[in-house]
Amino acid sequence: MNTQVAIIGAGPSGLLLGQLLHNVGIDNVILERQSPDYVLGRIRAGVLEQGMVDLLREAGVAARMDREGLPHDGFQLAFDGRCERIDLKGLTAGKSVMVYGQTEVTRDLMEARQASGAITLYNTSQLQLHELKGERPYLTFEHEGRTQRLTCDYIAGCDGFHGVSRQSIPAGVLQEFERVYPFGWLGILADTPPVHEELIYANHARGFALCSMRSPTRTRYYVQVGAEEKVEDWSDERFWDELKRRLPSDIASQLVTGPSIEKSIAPLRSFVVEPMQYGRLFLLGDAAHIVPPTGAKGLNLAASDVSTLYRILLKVYREGRVELLERYSAICLRRIWKAERFSWWMTSMLHRFPDTDAFSRRMQETELDYFVSSEAGRRTIAENYVGLPYEAIE
């Protein structure tokens, strides 16, 4: 089997890259280790930056998002017993974000992929990458009981942190940067109306809390918990009680509770590898970087990687601009590190760390008060939250 671009991973980044390439006539095949149902079962992020919204529209997969998604022109920062609104649209010349679950993005992309007739092979195993620095790299894998070979021009590794793509790069090539945070987020999904029309990020002496949503009738809430906590120790009642304690009283009084339909604890970490390419292999999304969810950047950073590689490959195939391939990693990393900085800042400002003393609490509150009391500070938060511009490929 031959193709132009082999894509490893049928999550949203792999599917989005595949759809963009297919639309302009660049042949691609997607290989996925899991089943379609497993991929759709992942419950992840739900806040899409303006850039990702625009990219989904460019790919022709935004009809349901535009119909059912929830555009948000601002969000709330709660601290010191009060709520302060960050006016995203007013501070960024009209940009906003879209609340639309990653599962729904993936479903839309899967349906578009199936309708296009492009090849996606699910339930593959024993995947290996070969000749990454050669003219024609290839992949070998097991599918439906047979060993197969896929030869290509380029490989896009969209297979996540534990995938084979990054692990296929020889030792000593990559430099890793990592910070593991001493806490996690306990999150629940519930069929209850949102407590507020916009997201609320709360800093409290007991720890961080986030009020989010998936639709007008389905909510996603989080509370910070210790790294050693177990999800089975948290009943629904205990969760709701703790969430109420961490919200301003006027918000807490409006909270509608109900049985959870999903409950999990997500650890927080920052992770980046440099470079994001090796020969004809390019890393995208979680294969190359992870951010704490505080700044809502994980899926959005994957989308910006997709945009960069897609636009480079477009110029390679249409104009013969192969020299642009060497710029992929540097272009992506400039935006990634800025998003890592924003996510680190949001995490540092909103969470209770084990060594947080009275002085540190005052510094957190003062830092937040300084930013929200200044138009320049609010604009800094807003422009990072809606997403920094994608770098043009010239």
Image: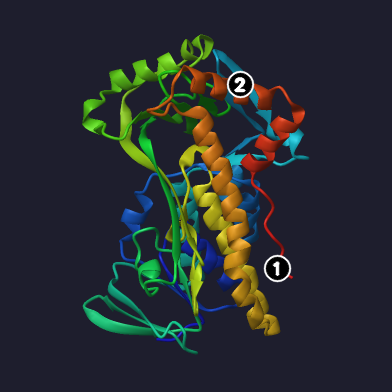
- Given residues 312 and 262, the one toward you in this image is 312
Coloring applied to the structure: rainbow
Relative image position of residue 329 (x, y in whole percent) = 57, 67
Asked if residue 44 is positioned above or below residue 212 in the image, the reply reads below
Residue at 62% over, 55% down = 335
State the residue position of label 1. Answer: 393
Residue 174 visible somewhere in the drawing: yes
* Amino acid at pointer 1: Ile
In-image side of 121 versus 89 (left or right): left
Residue 24 visible somewhere in the drawing: no
Within 10 Å of disc 1 (Cα), the crowding (few <14, some 14-19, many 20+) is: some
- Given residues 114 and 26, the one toward you in this image is 26
Relative image position of residue 322 (x, y in whole percent) = 64, 82
In the structure shown, which secondary structural element does the residue marked by tag 2 occupy? helix
- Given residues 232 and 271, the one toward you in this image is 271
Relative image position of residue 56 (x, y in whole percent) = 60, 55
* Amino acid at pointer 2: Thr
State the residue position of label 2. Answer: 366
Residue at 74% over, 39% down = 92
- Given residues 76 and 324, the one toward you in this image is 324
